[in-house]
Amino acid sequence: MNQAVRGVSIADGRMTVDGVTGAFIQAVGRPLALEADGLALVRGHVWREGVRHEANRIEARARPREASLHRAGYPGEAHDIALTIRPFPTEGAQAPLLRLGLSGDTQEAGLDQNYRADLFLPQPLFAELGRDLAASAPEPLHLSLSAATDLWLREAEPEALPGRPLAFHLGLEAASGRSASGHGRVESIEWSRAGLRSGTAPADPDAAAAEADPEEEPDDPVSEQLRRINWSLKQVLIVLAFLMLIVALK
């Protein structure tokens, strides 16, 4: 499935795409939330330089929560996302990382436009999830997470009414105009037996209303610019972390 090349311009945190009205801006301060079900442990091994290593992973089906995921410049959205959860190849205190993109030419039945996500967890956290997954059988686990990403929003999106689902977009590569991967750092993650979700107490409507309509001071342009610069530096560090991860996996 070849992607058509689109003309794209990226400058000063704004992206414009040929044939698309309006611009896109990166989703500063707007985390993406995902939910996943159908978690299944897949055991395996790989050999690197003649040394055997465990290559266990967890496969699941994910979907955005109170949001949607699209490709900038293309119609349609992701209803189902093929999620693969892996441990980092080395121990350490890394924060979980999330990568979103397309499956390339791989055709996966039932998965809209072949969207996929890769979630990398610290080894102790991956082991804990694996133990809970085995202990919950045959009852499935439900997983949810929230991540700060470098995905894009329509320029008018941040002014949307509170409670309106956000439409996140995969960006385009400036050089080729093809859909690019999105990257993010996971801010929160939790899982539980799927049957327990129905017993969750409803949120306090007054508290929800207060959260949806906070009394905030008008934005200070200087503070907003500093916040965007700080966010951009964090995204650079996330991409560097992924590059080091790719090297470590080879």
Image (cartoon, helix red, strand yellow):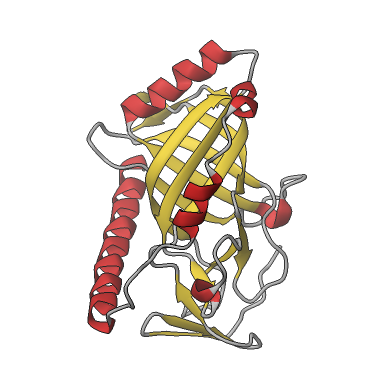
Q: Residue at x 32, y 62 (%)?
A: 235
Q: Is residue 185 left or right of residue 196?
A: left
Q: Tell me the quarter of the image containing the N terminus.
A: bottom right
* Residue 77 drawn above or below residue 134: below
* Residue 214 position within the rendered picture, expressed as x and y whole percent measured from the top left: 41, 62
The one nearer the camera, 206 or 121, is: 206
Tell me where residue 128 sits by quadrant: top left
* Residue 244 position within the rendered picture, expressed as x and y whole percent measured from the top left: 29, 50
The one nearer the camera, 205 or 164, is: 205
Q: Residue at x 23, y 36 (%)?
A: 93
Q: Tell me the quarter of the image containing the C terminus.
A: top left
Q: Is residue 50 visible?
A: no
Toward the front, the furthest residue is: 206
How many callouts does the rendering have?
A: 0
* Residue 26 position within the rendered picture, expressed as x and y whole percent measured from the top left: 44, 72
* Residue 207 position within the rendered picture, expressed as x and y whole percent measured from the top left: 47, 48
The one nearer the camera, 43 or 119, is: 119
Q: Is residue 211 left or right of residue 154?
A: left
* Residue 100 drawn above or below residue 119: below
* Residue 44 drawn above or below residue 154: above
Q: Is residue 147 visible?
A: yes
Tell me where residue 230 sits by quadrant: bottom left
Q: Residue at x 52, y 38 (%)?
A: 144
